[in-house]
Image: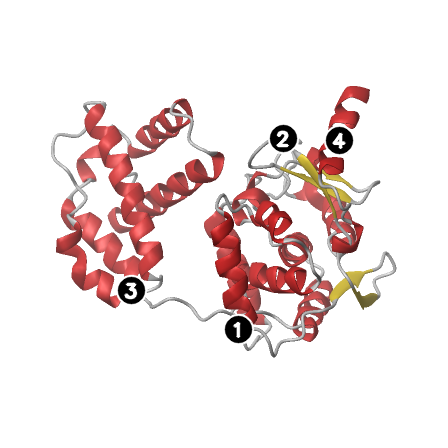
Amino acid sequence: MALRELIAQFEAFLERQGYRQMTLVGYLEDIQQFYEFLKAHLGREPEIADLTPERCKAYLADQAQRYRRSTLMRRLASLRSFQRFLQSAGHLAEPFVPRTAELSEFLEKAQQAQEILCLSSDELRQIWESLLRAKTPRAVRDLAIIALFVEWGFPSEWLIRFRVDDVDLERSRVRIPDLVEQAMWIPVRAAREPLRRYLILRERFNPTGAEPALFLSQLGRPISRQSLWQSLRSWGEILRLRKPLTPQALRNTAAYRLSRQGVPADTLQIVFGHTNPLSTRFLLRRLNRACREVDVSRLPILQPTGDIVMGAGAEEWLPADLSELHASSTADEEGA
């Protein structure tokens, strides 16, 4: 049986199990990585018979050359979950994922934890100016993505799942999923004009008009976490930035700025997508040590004229009581 079909069955299985969306997306991205590796390695569409311990080891060895140990362990957990599904469904007789003890060599070679990095306000301005000069549809799209990252530190999974109707330019806000209750509308300032420009040309990525996802690949499909990461990294290399341009570096920049601006930790927990408040506190402690010499106080605010002014983000517009953000969402839905 074709592996692509089994991955689709695995996705349906995860949805029936009630997995949180971010967990589901993470599992599927990891399995898709393995699928793409097998397809390139075999030169054809992989099938269930191609799942062997030797090929799984080859995949993990390749991953160990490029990713941290924590990422490798996450990939391993996803593969084991996929393996359990295949065995329980009767598709797989023998396991293909090696035991952890057999992978010690690869885990030792995996890159150590990345340095904690923040981008300065001047470095952000350089990114804005360079992508504006590029003028390509991809540059317009990626500037909107970068702006959302550095304004609020949203998780990559949220940006991937944003729909067009989650953007309200008239009120300068975007709708995010609240991890506890219901959707919330979060104000945007630095991201507003980049989003407006992207929405004008988004139809170039979506010629049929049938795809509701906000950020699309050049093939017209929702952008994946991997392609998002690769696109940002390539811009960092093109612009010859001194620091790697990654989702984590951009989110760190937002987190450090927002904490320095006095945004409460419980609010930061929501916009960062953390389920555990200790994760937020731990992140902020590390950033306060690692980025204390970096000036991140201002964001590039793109004007409709194309000019850039440096100023505060939309955190200034947050109400003291976050329930107002829920209330505005509910009122809009009732009035529709």
- Closer to the N terminus: mark 2 or mark 4? 2
Judging by the rendered image, the residue that carries numbered circle 1 is 289
Q: CA distance from mark 3 to mark 2?
A: 39 Å
Task: Please give left or right for residue 56 compared with residue 179 in the image.
Answer: left
Q: CA distance from mark 3 to mark 1?
A: 25 Å
Crowd band around label 1 with a 10 angstrom C-alpha radius: few (<14), some (14–19), many (20+): few
Judging by the rendered image, the residue that carries numbered circle 2 is 182
For residue 327, the mark is: 4
Crowd band around label 3 with a 10 angstrom C-alpha radius: few (<14), some (14–19), many (20+): many
Classify the position of the N terminus by image quarter.
top left
Tell us which disc is closer to us: 4 or 3. 4
- Closer to the N terminus: mark 3 or mark 1? 3
- Mark 1 vs 4: CB contact within 8 A: no
Judging by the rendered image, the residue that carries numbered circle 3 is 110
Q: Residue at x 13, y 54 (%)?
A: 101
Q: CA distance from mark 2 to mark 1?
A: 34 Å
| Residue 3 visible, this orientation | yes
- Closer to the N terminus: mark 4 or mark 3? 3
Secondary structure of the residue carrying numbered label 4: helix
Secondary structure of the residue carrying numbered label 1: helix
Q: Nearer the viewer, residue 236 or 106?
A: 106
| Residue 246 visible, this orientation | no
Q: Position of residue 175 (x, y in %)?
A: 68, 38
Residue type for callout 1:
Arg
Secondary structure of the residue carrying numbered label 2: loop
For residue 98, the mark is: none
Q: Residue at x 62, y 39 (%)?
A: 162
